[in-house]
Image (cartoon, rainbow, N blue to C red):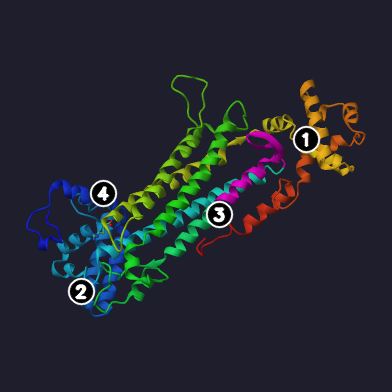
Amino acid sequence: MAKLWKGRFSKELDERVNDFNSSISFDSAMYLEDITGSIAHVTMLGRQGIVTEEEAKKIASELAAIADDITEGRLAFDPEAEDIHMFVEEELTKRLGAPGKKLHTARSRNDQVAVDLRMYMRKRIDEIVGMLRKLVETLVGIAENNLETVMPGYTHLQRAQPITLAHHMMAYVEMFRRDMTRFFNCFELMNESPLGCGALATTTYPIDREYTAKMLGFDAPCANSLDGVSDRDYCVEFCSAAALTMTHLSRLSEEIIMWCSWEFKFVELDDAYATGSSIMPQKKNPDICELIRGKTGRTVGDLITLLTVLKGLPLAYNKDMQEDKEAVFDSADTLKQCLSIIVPMLKTARFIKENMLAAAKKGFINATDCADYLVGKGMPFRDAYAVVGALVAKCTEKGVGLDELPLEDFKASSELFDSDVYDAIDLIGCVKGRKAVGGPAPEAVAAHIEKIRSTVLKPWREEE
Ligand code: ARG
């Protein structure tokens, strides 16, 4: 097919170069943004008298018809087209003839693609933030039902101190809350319009960049045209936020995978969210979690791809930048897919409180509390630590927990022990005592939940 830029060329493009150069197979995903940007551009051209008002109206309404035709499946993308921008312009000219050829006055594909991508990403960010909110809501729901569900907290994957399932879930809420903020920040920083930057140095036509910026929902036009067409910081920031969110999802997935094992059995996934084995009849596998954990690698790869593409690029536009979209699209799609599946999986999961409590009872996770008991009776902490260490050794020898050790054994190691030690090392008591801000005590976690409900989970858009 003849290229719109064929003017100075005397030969047709080699077929292989055409395929290599073409981006229509993926940038067609931005057709709505491309057409919306073009409508704003041509409306401005009409207002400024660069084309006639009549031409502008005609072009804008035909562009809208093209968008409808694509959406309704009446118009298919031409795989031979170089990119979505050329495809739309060619289609417009096919339909309108001469006036169609005026659309590209006072702009370049360089500012066009930059404006399209920013608009595309704004939508994806809105969707992702909405999905993250649902995830936070789900985790908060689990927390609310498990304020007193005692489980072991771990360090080095060794049972360490008693916490609750609520406290554990709310740790993830904090991660995802920050992820939401990262996406908001990305949106805010990139919400400036490159339209009118032209190929690199704006144009001599009397364009109105403020007008198109406003029409397309941007806060302002980009302040420097070289930067406007060559900045891809927002792609890096988007992929960074996506990779970090995926990393958080991956950590949560890893814990659920462990919790599903017979070694833990803290959770039973709903049958609709687990899979079987083709050979082992007993198997019920947490494939969803494993796939989320695995897909995290892609998003990290997307981020590295972008940074590597950008690092050596001189100003302004270079075709290398065409590589930005697949990384961004892949990260957006992967993250959205994972968020959409983890929420119902968590909602339908059954947490097995008895097993959590049984695990909490083993492993001496109340040893710190036992030492604190002695400190309360006047012993310096370091001495108390040594006394309890010896008691743990004795318990291990006898095969019992601290709470099962007879009082005389306690008394034999320190005079300060009395029968109230059993209250001091009672697991739920140990949890309830940790009521510092951010701690696992039910009242501290309830306060955290309340804070999340009144901030993150408050409607953030008027329409909600
Ligand atoms: N398909 C191109 C991209 O995604 C559009 C911009 C092309 N600009 C150019 N000067 N060849 O980057």
Question: Circle 1 sits in a helix, a strand or a loop, which is it?
Answer: helix
Does 240 sit above or below residue 252?
below
The kind of residue tagged 3 is Arg
Along the line of sight, which residue is nearer the eye, 250 or 316? 316
Q: Is mark 2 within 8 Å of ligand 1?
A: no
Residue 153: within the magenta? yes
How far from the left and from the top, in percent, is residue 206? 26, 79
What is the span of residues highlighted in magenta in the rendered image? 148-177
Residue 15 visible here: yes
Q: Is residue 392 left or right of residue 449?
A: right
Q: Residues within 10 Å of mark 4 (few under 14, many from 20)?
A: some
Residue 14, horizontal then vertical, whole percent? 12, 49
Q: Nearer the viewer, residue 247 or 29?
A: 247
Question: Which residue is disc 4 drawn over?
Answer: 25
- Give amino acid for label 1: Ala
Q: Which residue is mark 3?
A: 178
Tell me the CA gap for discs 4 and 1.
61 Å
State the residue position of label 2: 55
Q: Earlier in the sequence, mark 2 or mark 4?
A: 4
- From the image, tell me which residue sits under label 1: 367
* Separation of residues labelled 4 and 3 (CA atoms): 34 Å
